Image (tube, rainbow, N blue to C red):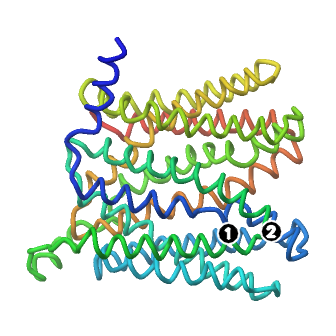
Amino acid sequence: MITKAAKYYVNTFKGLSKEIWLLAFVNLVNRCGTMVGAFLMIYLTTQIGCTLSQAGIVIALFGIGAIFGSLLGGKLTDTVGFYKVQLITLVLGGFIFIILGQLKTYVSICVCTFILGLINEAFRPANSAAMASYCDDNNRMRSFSLMRLAFNLGWAVGGGLGGLLASYSYQYLFWVDGITNICAAILIYFLLPPKIITASKEKIKEVLVKVSAYKDYTFLLFASVSLLYIISFFQMMSNMTAFFKNEIHFTERTIGFLMMWNGILIVLVEMSLVYYLERKWTKRNALLLGVSFHVIAYLILIIFPVNFWISFLCITFITLSEMFAFPVMVAFWMKRSDENNRGQYAGIWTMTWAIAQSTGTFLGSSVAQHFGFTTLWWLVVILCSISIFFYAKLVKN
């Protein structure tokens, strides 16, 4: 039984292109240095002397920069190609991380953080376009899941290392984050040379005119519906942790374990799950079930008295939700794009996530503060239920 399960798990990684593996390795290196974001609020309030509201403005400026960066990155990807955009944004972002750590005045930190959000998020559409270019229809969902596996491993390493480094000096966080960005650029330069597109300029121009992502109304509606689900998803990494700490009185160690369980489950299960879904399920059914799991997760918080095991069950269902839904969501927009307009699609999709992250946390905290966390959980259930209804209309088998 164990041997058979191990063989099945190994088979889930077969058939992926060499470039996908190399890109996953690059993203793993980059993610291992992702630590400034997790500790920025603490750094601003304890080291710089900002109030909570001032620190919140800095975080919001990063989100605003990320929204503009998503569109800029998508445009540049279609103009100069994902290869150059990845290199430029990683190198620039690396230096800006280091510079940010040296700034001490509030205004300069605000300006630098906005620029960092702009550059950082301009990388993501190019990175998504690179992934789409290196995979095909038969393994697109597994390719995305491999990237998520790399992201989660890197996030676990970066988060743990960041806490250790911060106990000595917060300056280390900015230097490591910056250096790993630059190292990722170096790896792309040597391991992933630019992919040559042989289509003529006239043909590219013709395709761009005919199929613009900004005129693909089905995709734009899909992104709008996804915004409701993604806003709901971001509650786990923001307001749910505040709920666990302030309302249920869990320790930081307990909360950390619950968040870690999310990453562990993804690493252990997602590739095998997506491998099975690709062969046995329709994408539509996987997406609908995934978002339904999110509804179940928050109904658990509403119906049952919350303790550790109820919280553990809730996080498990949220993780199942993203494992079923996220690969399908990415496959949906990638399938509609091609080499000539992929940056547009990736830019809009990245912007959707940036908007969800910057607004979802703020709106969720406002609802929780004025009306209570139970009201927020009901709001999540309603938003996800609406998204299920529209996903059923939009996504075909």
Disc 2 + disc 1, Cβ < 8 Å: yes
Q: Which residue is mark 1?
A: 173
Work out which residue is located at the far top of the displayed protein and give it.
Answer: 1
Q: What type is the residue that disc 2 sits on?
A: Tyr
Reading the image, the residue beneath label 2 is 43
Q: Does 132 appear above or below 285?
A: below
Q: Residue at left 78%, top 66%? A: 168
Which residue: 74% across, 82% down?
A: 109
Q: Position of residue 310 (x, y in %)?
A: 73, 21
Instruction: Please state the horizontal and vertical placement of residue 96, each as a whole percent of the image.
Output: 59, 83
Identify which residue is drawn at 76% across, 70% down.
Answer: 170
Residue 144 locus on image (x, y percent): 36, 48
- Where residue 211 appears, as percent x and y from the top left, is 24, 66
Q: Earlier in the sequence, mark 2 or mark 1?
A: 2
Frontmost of labels 2 and 1 is 1
In the displayed structure, 289 sits above or below 140; it is above
Q: Secondary structure beneath disc 1?
A: helix
Q: Amino acid at mark 1?
A: Leu
The residue nearer to you, when weighing 377 against 164, is 164
Residue 16 against residue 12 in the figure, above or below: below
Horizontal side of residue 282 vs 265, given as left or right: left
Work out which quarter of the rendered image holds the N terminus and state it: top left
* Label 2 CA crowd tier, 10 Å (few <14, some 14–19, many 20+): some
Q: How many marks?
A: 2
How far, Cα to Cα, is label 2 from label 1? 10 Å
Q: Name the one closer to the observer, 44 or 72.
A: 44
Would residue 18 be found to the left or right of residue 273 on screen? left
Image position of 36 (left or right of 91): right
Residue lying furthest front in this view?
168
Q: Residue at x 43, y 70 (%)?
A: 184
Q: Looking at this view, is 369 or 266 the one in front?
A: 266
